[in-house]
Image: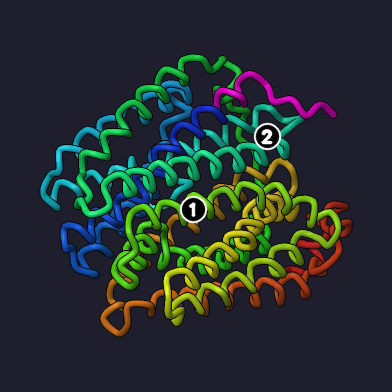
């Protein structure tokens, strides 16, 4: 099978990489900006929660209208909205305006975003059906790599102005990012548009396995929402008085490691199985996450976070593949929608909880996130053992819907 991406896929990967570079820069800047403005933990949690909630709302809105008004058109309009958001935030508005912008879903709390644009890209990449696995692998890798470059740029800003307060004007970078995204959207072919709807037919009830996975993924996403990149930037700045240069380099290195990890994960999955790869890498990463809270120095905390970055991302492509293997091919869209919606829905409240937890201890969100996400790993392994999917990659790929039907898990 050819490993070359189709023309539309190349455009989508390039657009996501450009946006990833912008978000990699602003995710680091945002936490430092909040610290510079002396925003309290609860208020910071509200803003981060609003950004996540905005991503969820924008994703649902895009899912509702894109196929009717056109995927390319929706994609281009959302890119223009990113440019507008960068312009508004760059003008250093009051916190209430920042809150409104956050709710639009045009900002990201993480180096690699998972919002409305990503939802559209995942749907349009699926049109390159014979290369779907290959396309998604490179899509995730380029996103993480571009995010790393954005984080490096933030580090260089901190190096040049080490004692200067972070200014909101740095968010102007999203203006060209959004405009370039809109221009590239015009290069997509009609092949990415939704096919004509087929006549309605009676569909099978969603497999119980999908509902189980949706619940498990929601727990994992909720734990992850406690420790977004924005929170980690805020945490290390306040706890260790780390400079913007140091924080930018940390996120640069983490994103580069993640870009490599998402390419390694499928190799491990072919050898050990999807679930074994997920749990075997994700559980140790969550132990490290909890230990960061007790790291006495920034260098030690950075080593723990970077080691975690080599393990945790392997859950992403394997998780996506697992969902696709427990349903029939014609049920995959519904399965992906349900599991993704569950993840989006679980995340918005997490930063609020993180803000409240910081009244107990600054690093409390790290400990709680490690426990919650570790519990997800153990629950997933238990579920997989009951379903007969714990270790064998072949058994998963052979006849996934039979496993779901027989085990009823």
Decide: is 144 above or below 403.
above
Residue ID for mark 1: 341
Q: Is residue 263 visible?
A: yes
Q: Quadrant of the N terminus?
A: top right
Question: Which badge, 1 or 2, comes first in the chain's sequence?
Answer: 2
Q: Outermost residue, bottom direction?
A: 360
Q: Are marks 1 and 2 in contact (CB under 8 Å)?
A: no
In the displayed structure image, the side of residue 113 where residue 79 appears, left or right:
left
Q: Position of residue 188 (x, y in %)?
A: 53, 17
Q: Position of residue 22 (x, y in %)?
A: 39, 37
Q: Nearer the viewer, residue 351 or 288?
A: 288
The span picked out in magenta is 1-12
Q: Nearer the viewer, residue 186 or 140?
A: 140
Q: Quadrant of residue 152?
A: top left
Q: Position of residue 82 (x, y in %)?
A: 32, 33
Residue ID for mark 2: 135
Q: Is residue 196 visible?
A: no
In the displayed structure image, the side of residue 283 where residue 226 appears, left or right:
left
Decide: is 370 above or below 393.
below
In the rendering, which numbered label is found on residue 166?
A: none
Q: Residue at x 56, y 74 (%)?
A: 288
Does the magenta segment cover residue 5? yes
Q: Residue at x 57, y 34 (%)?
A: 123
Q: Nearer the viewer, residue 96 or 126?
A: 96
């Amino acid at each position: 099978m050819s490993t070359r991406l189709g023309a539309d896929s190349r455009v989508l990967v390039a657009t996501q990489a450009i946006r990833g570079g912008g978000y990699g820069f602003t995710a680091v800047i945002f936490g430092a900006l909040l610290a510079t403005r002396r925003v309290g933990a609860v208020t910071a949690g509200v803003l981060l929660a609003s950004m996540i909630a905005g991503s969820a709302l924008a994703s649902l809105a895009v899912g509702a209208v894109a196929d009717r008004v056109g995927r390319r058109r929706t994609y281009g309009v959302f890119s223009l909205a990113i440019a507008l958001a960068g312009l508004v935030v760059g003008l250093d508005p009051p916190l209430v305006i920042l809150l409104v912008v956050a709710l639009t879903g045009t900002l990201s709390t993480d180096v690699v975003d998972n919002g409305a644009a990503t939802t559209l890209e995942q749907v349009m990449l699926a049109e390159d059906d014979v290369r779907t696995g290959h396309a998604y692998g490179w899509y995730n890798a380029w996103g993480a790599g571009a995010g790393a470059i954005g984080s490096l740029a933030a580090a260089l800003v901190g190096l040049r102005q080490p004692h200067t307060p972070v200014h909101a004007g740095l968010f102007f970078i999203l203006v060209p990012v959004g405009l370039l995204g809109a221009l590239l959207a015009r290069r997509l072919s009609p092949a990415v548009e939704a096919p004509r709807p087929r006549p309605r037919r009676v569909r099978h009830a969603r497999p119980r396995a999908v509902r189980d996975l949706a619940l498990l993924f929601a727990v994992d996403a909720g734990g992850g929402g406690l420790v977004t990149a924005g929170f980690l930037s805020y945490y290390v700045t306040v706890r260790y008085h780390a400079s913007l240069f140091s924080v930018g380099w940390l996120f640069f290195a983490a994103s580069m490691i993640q870009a490599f990890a998402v390419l390694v994960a499928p190799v491990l999955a072919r050898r050990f199985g999807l679930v074994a790869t997920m749990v075997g890498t994700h559980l140790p990463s969550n132990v490290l996450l909890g230990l960061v809270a007790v790291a006495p120095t920034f260098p030690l905390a950075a080593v723990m976070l970077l080691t975690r970055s080599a393990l945790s991302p392997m859950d992403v492509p394997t998780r996506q593949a697992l969902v696709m293997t427990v349903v029939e091919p014609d049920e995959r869209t519904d399965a992906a929608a349900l599991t993704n919606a569950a993840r989006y829905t679980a995340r918005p409240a997490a930063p609020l909880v993180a803000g409240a937890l910081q009244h107990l201890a600054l690093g409390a969100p790290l400990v709680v996130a490690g426990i919650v996400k570790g519990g997800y790993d153990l629950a997933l392994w238990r579920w997989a053992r009951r379903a007969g999917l714990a270790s064998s990659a072949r058994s998963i790929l052979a006849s996934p819907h039979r496993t779901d039907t027989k085990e009823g898990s």
